[in-house]
Image (cartoon, rainbow, N blue to C red):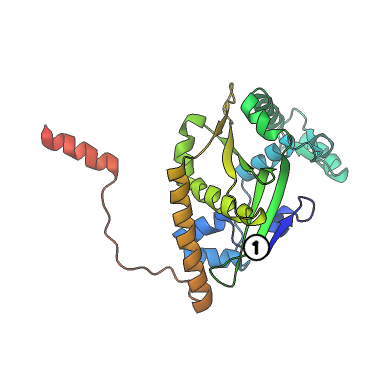
Amino acid sequence: MSIRIIPPTEETNAAYHASGAWGSSLISTFIKSPALSHLMITGRYRPPETPAMRFGTRFHALLDPTSNFAAKHQKGPDADRRTKIWAAAEAEATAAGIELIPGDEWEMLHAMEASVRANPIAMSLLEGAEHEIGFRMDAPQGPFQVQCRADLLHRFSHVVDIKTTADVDAFNVSVSTYGYHRQAALYRWIVSHACGGELPDWSFLVVEKSYPQFRCRVLDLNDEYLAIGWREVSSALDEIGRRTAEKDWSDHRDAEVLVPPTWMATVNRVADVA
């Protein structure tokens, strides 16, 4: 099985996402809606870029010493973004190939960077790492490709994904909500094909966007969580292979039975006892 390693300068973000290969976010979308995932994989629908996505991209660049962040970004004037002062400064920056960043966001980005650099475990993951290394390969489940892009890579022993969050103590909720356990499983599986079959270690480098602490932690998933992630990814890839062959991307399912959420069942059990 051939695998392509993609240096960070070889593909833009837009080109990477338009490659036609299945990544972790697209697989998570497929699990919820095959029809929507097919619109996305064929380029007929592109989710709009959100402020959170732009902020994350800027933060990754700030941590990457090869991105030349200082030369490509500039703190904007202390003025409302709807004013002529801001518009003039932005026009001047754009003409010079510089992205203007609002002052509050600029301060937050650099406070978060300082928090990372004050964390010795986080710094050990940054030191000697390659940034934004992509991988793309043919899927054994059918005539399609899968891909991933490692935020930080220590070839090929450790993959690190950088996440920003409102509360590091609640990151476990984000993992299940956004399918980060599937991301970890998919990335480890793909990268393992580039290094002869050994599954690399995986870590999340998580930084708060909350003033004033901007806490930074390195968080790992235990083996059980990684196993669950791989079962979900593997099942989805099998289904993507079948649907690719049959050209069936409908969302229809058999009738399902809904059960009450845990909190509702707990409250009612307490009421019954009372």
Name which residue lies at 77% across and 31% down.
Answer: 75
Residue 257 shown left or right of residue 123 in the figure: left
Q: Position of residue 249 (x, y in %)?
A: 48, 71
Give the crowd class for mark 1: few <14, some 14-19, many >=20 residues within 10 Å.
Answer: many
| Residue sitting farthest toward the right | 96
**In this figure, what is the number of numbered marks?**
1
- Seen at 79% across and 55% down, the residue is 10
Residue 41 lies, with reference to residue 258, above or below; the image says below
- Choose top left, top right, bottom left or bottom right for residue 176: top left
Determine whether, in the image, residue 90 is placed left or right of residue 153. Answer: right
Q: Position of residue 156 (x, y in %)?
A: 67, 46
The residue located at (45%, 61%) in the rendering is 235
Q: Dividing the image into 4 quarters, which one contains the N terminus? A: bottom right
**Nearer to the camera, 120 or 78:** 120
Please determine whether, in this image, residue 18 is positioned above or below residue 203. below
What percent of the width, then of the height, locates residue 77? 78, 30
Q: Which one is nearer the viewer's eye here, 100 or 86?
A: 100
Query: What's the amino acid at mark 1?
Result: Met
Hey, which quadrant is residue 21 in on the image? bottom right
Residue 16 or 136: which is nearer the viewer?
A: 136
**Seen in the image, is 211 located left or right of residue 232?**
right
**Residue 273 visible:** yes
SS class, disc 1: strand
* Residue 17 seen from this side: no
The quadrant in which the C terminus is found is top left
Residue at (52% x, 37% y) in the render: 220
Q: Which residue is mark 1?
A: 137
